[in-house]
Image (cartoon, rainbow, N blue to C red):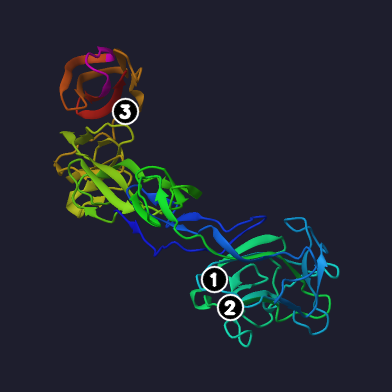
């Protein structure tokens, strides 16, 4: 998904504050500094540089310019800290109920311009006269008047909590901010741009004598430098904003130039591309099952391998994918029947078995979980095979006649070694008559069928591949099946 980040942007002055800055800054600001690949970002240039100075003043001489006034008390010097210039500054006095004010004369700012100054708050809890404001209403307002001081309008309020706002009033405690000297820069509002506008810095509320003090220095009121324009490092010229697609991490530089093409100032920003998320996964399901993918879609009755890609937005809002391959596990339960014995031919690692009574609504035959099943009574029986968590049920096998194996002493008969490499021994424990040995491999093929009229120890050479074999041993009318592993 491609996104476009847009905000209204023009060439204007931002309130800027940074310690020891000595001029208003030209700067650029993107709508976002980290975006998804292919997104479009708009970057706006803001600020200007000062043109001609209307009024510039510091307090080094301990006085104010003609037409300016200070009321409510105040001192000059380096009373509580050193200013950025290392020279004297104005420090407010809050003795009694006085209101500290620094007020300018009326001046012509009809062409607009910039107000720049250094300001600091005292430290909360500091010794007199350096104790600073902490309540919301103990901050300092920069104001203008169009009627020679009869009424005043806030341009900005320095809230002791560290924010710029209009004066909120009230009395709410909080941490002290603006306690380091900073240079602050504000545009003259359009409705303040007249031929006789006054400005003032005022603290309306304090906690009384020797509390909530603040300092002011290096005041400059100037108009804008005219005839400037902005060029961009991508080749765009004479515009205060650009919108560009971002494919990779990109550095953009804006140049503030005058009518002669000289660069007056420049600023740079970096737009980073957020990495999309992409992964692949393989899952196993039982044949015929359903599977729900990462995006919520579902594939039903999966009988063949299926690959699906889920598209979604990750935590950063970027297009991302998860590719899932679903492999169905096929289990086919199979068995062979010899007389009254049923033998499962599924022999995979981890395979488990359960025998069912088909004639009793496929109820589980209790305790019958072996590969070979010799039922205790005639009936119809089926095999459930479980492999890799998936199961299948065989068709039913019918047992009509049972071979009586319980009265024969099978415990005296042994087969060894098991597992075997090639040869193994059937030890009958004593001489037996009418002995038959039949060996069947895992797929039901007969690999040996041999009769002995009389035998006690039988040596067998087992040919064929490695795997499981079923040794069906008959002695007269008795029969049993042994599982033999060939390695």
Q: CA distance from mark 3 to mark 2?
A: 119 Å
Whichever of callouts 3 and 2 sits on the residue coming sooner in the sequence is 2
Q: Residue 391, can we see it?
A: yes
Magenta extent: 456-468
Q: Position of residue 127 (x, y in %)?
A: 85, 68
Q: Is residue 63 above or below residue 345?
A: below
Residue under the image location 40 percent in, 45 percent down: 233
Q: Residues within 10 Å of mark 3 (few under 14, many from 20)?
A: some
Taking the magenta stretch, the answer to whether it contains residue 347 is no
Query: Residue 52 bears which disc, if any?
Result: none
Whichever of callouts 3 and 1 sits on the residue coming sooner in the sequence is 1
Residue farthest right in this picture? 128
Decide if residue 461 is on the left or right side of residue 70.
Answer: left
Give the foreground label among 2 and 1.
Answer: 2
Q: CA distance from mark 3 to mark 1?
A: 110 Å
* Quadrant, the C terminus: top left
Q: Residues within 10 Å of mark 2 (few under 14, many from 20)?
A: many
Query: Which residue is labeled 2 in the image?
Result: 197
Whichever of callouts 2 and 1 sits on the residue coming sooner in the sequence is 1
């Amino acid at each position: 998904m491609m996104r476009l980040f847009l905000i209204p942007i023009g060439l204007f002055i931002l309130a800027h504050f940074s310690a020891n800055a000595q001029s208003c800054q030209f700067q650029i600001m993107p709508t976002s500094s980290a975006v998804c690949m292919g997104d479009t970002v708009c970057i706006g240039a803001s600020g200007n540089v000062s043109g001609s100075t209307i009024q510039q003043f510091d307090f080094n001489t301990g006085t104010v310019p003609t037409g300016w006034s200070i009321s409510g008390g105040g001192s000059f010097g380096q009373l509580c800290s050193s200013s950025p210039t290392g020279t004297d500054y104005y420090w407010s006095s809050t003795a009694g109920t006085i209101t500290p004010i620094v007020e300018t004369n009326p001046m012509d700012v009809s062409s607009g311009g910039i107000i720049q100054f250094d300001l600091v708050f005292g430290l909360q809890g500091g010794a007199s006269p350096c104790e600073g404001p902490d309540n919301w209403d103990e901050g300092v307002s920069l104001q203008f008047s169009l009627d020679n001081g009869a009424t005043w309008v806030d341009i900005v309020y320095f809230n002791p909590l560290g924010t710029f706002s209009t004066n909120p009033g009230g009395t709410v405690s909080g941490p002290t901010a603006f306690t380091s000297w900073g240079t602050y820069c504000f545009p003259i509002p359009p409705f303040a741009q007249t031929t006789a506008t006054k400005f003032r810095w005022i603290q309306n509320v304090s906690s009384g004598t020797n509390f909530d003090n603040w300092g002011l220095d290096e005041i400059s009121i100037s108009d804008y430098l005219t005839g400037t324009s902005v060029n961009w490092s991508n080749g765009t010229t004479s515009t205060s904003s650009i919108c560009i697609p971002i494919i990779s991490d990109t550095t953009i530089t804006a140049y503030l130039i005058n009518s002669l093409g000289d660069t007056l100032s420049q600023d740079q920003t970096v737009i980073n591309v957020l990495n999309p998320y992409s992964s692949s996964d393989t899952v196993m399901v039982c044949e015929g099952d359903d599977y729900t993918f990462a995006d919520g879609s579902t594939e039903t009755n999966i009988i063949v391998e299926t690959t699906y890609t889920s598209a979604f937005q990750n935590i950063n809002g970027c297009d991302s994918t998860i590719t899932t391959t679903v492999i169905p596990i096929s289990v086919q339960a199979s068995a062979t029947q010899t007389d009254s014995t049923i033998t499962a031919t599924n022999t995979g690692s981890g395979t488990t078995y359960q025998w069912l009574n088909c004639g009793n609504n496929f109820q589980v035959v209790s305790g019958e979980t072996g590969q070979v099943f010799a039922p205790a009574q005639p009936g119809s029986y089926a095999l459930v095979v479980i492999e890799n968590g998936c199961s299948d049920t065989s068709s039913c096998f019918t047992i009509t006649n049972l071979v009586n194996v319980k009265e024969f002493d099978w415990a005296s008969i042994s087969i060894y070694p098991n597992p075997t490499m090639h040869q193994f021994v059937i030890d009958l424990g004593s001489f037996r008559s009418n002995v038959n040995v039949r060996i069947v491999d895992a797929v039901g093929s007969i690999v040996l069928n041999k009769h002995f009229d009389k035998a006690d120890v039988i040596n067998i050479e087992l040919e064929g591949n490695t795997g499981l074999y079923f040794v069906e041993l008959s002695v007269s009318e008795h029969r049993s099946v042994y599982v033999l592993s060939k390695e």
